[in-house]
Amino acid sequence: LRAALAQHPVLRVFVRWRDVETRGRTAAAHGVQVRLSDDEGRLISAAKSVAVMVAALTLHAAYDFSEVVAVDGSYDPEHSVRAWSGTPTPATAWGAYDGRCFHGGALPPASGNHAAELVAIHATLARVPDDARVLLLCDCQGAMSAIESVWRGASGGAAHDENATARGKAVTVVDAIVRRRRAMGDAGGTVVFLYTPAHSGGISANAYADAAAKAHLGAPPCEPDLQLSTS
């Protein structure tokens, strides 16, 4: 049964795995071990997970998604890393889970959770083919609103400079997401966002993405690559 579920882009992201919730599983990059904490595991709501899964399946019937990915960010003032100045600074990281692999990375210190959510979205879109049909499960309404605002032309990218985490780069993370989304659309791809409940009483897919983000808090921080994918 699990083998069959693993072939379905929606269902596989909602499957819970014993190794992830006990021993941990190695992420795709940095070799970090991703493990869902016991507390986070107990807080997962089966009812909310099923409700979001049903919504995702309904969207899948319309869009025939090739990828369904949960994304999340983590900002931990108690998990300090040394910034370029040498001063201990709160760590920030992003994570993503697609039902097959964990992805993630650490951002420049004190980038903040909002930026991490945006970088998780951009990194996911940059990783998939141009013609991919992607459903993103996200628990950050602020990030989705910022993207939608620029996508619909409500404001220019300059209004979102506070979301840029790459020092010295003119393009912001929000602008990079919108550009990538448009490039995918031109190639026959599509990107759909679905809001999901947050961690406390949230859904399993995003709890796994959150675990991936937290696992990368101790990874070497680096600025995100905001260049468009050439896949």
Image: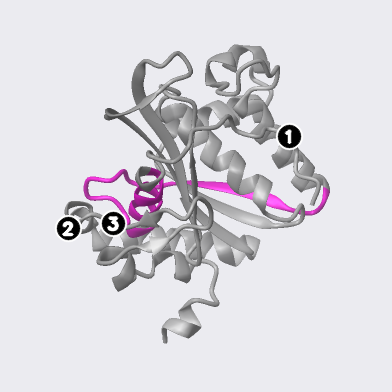
Residue that label 3 marks: 36
Q: Is residue 84 left or right of residue 214?
A: right
Tell which of 150 and 217 is nearer to you: 217
Mark 2 neighbour density, 10 Å: few (under 14) some (14–19) many (20 or more): few
* Residue farthest to the bottom, as pictured: 1
| Place of residue 63 in the rendered image (x, y in percent of width and height, measured from the top left) | 64, 60
Looking at the image, which residue is at 38% across and 57% down?
33
Q: Residue at x 17, y 52 (%)?
A: 39
- In the rendered image, residue 171, in percent from the top left (x then y), is placed at 69, 22
The image quadrant where one finds the N terminus is bottom left
Residue segment shown in magenta: 187-213
The first of marks 1 and 2 along the sequence is 2
Residue 191 included in the magenta stretch of the image: yes
Q: Which mark is residue 227?
A: 1
Query: Which kind of residue does numbered mark 1 sit on?
Result: Gln
Residue carrying label 2: 42
Residue 20, quarter of picture: bottom left
Q: Please state the horizontal and vertical placement of residue 129, each as a whole percent of the image.
A: 73, 56
| Residue type of the residue flagged with mark 2 | Arg
Q: Mark 3 belongs to which amino acid?
A: Leu
N-terminal-most mark, 3 or 1: 3
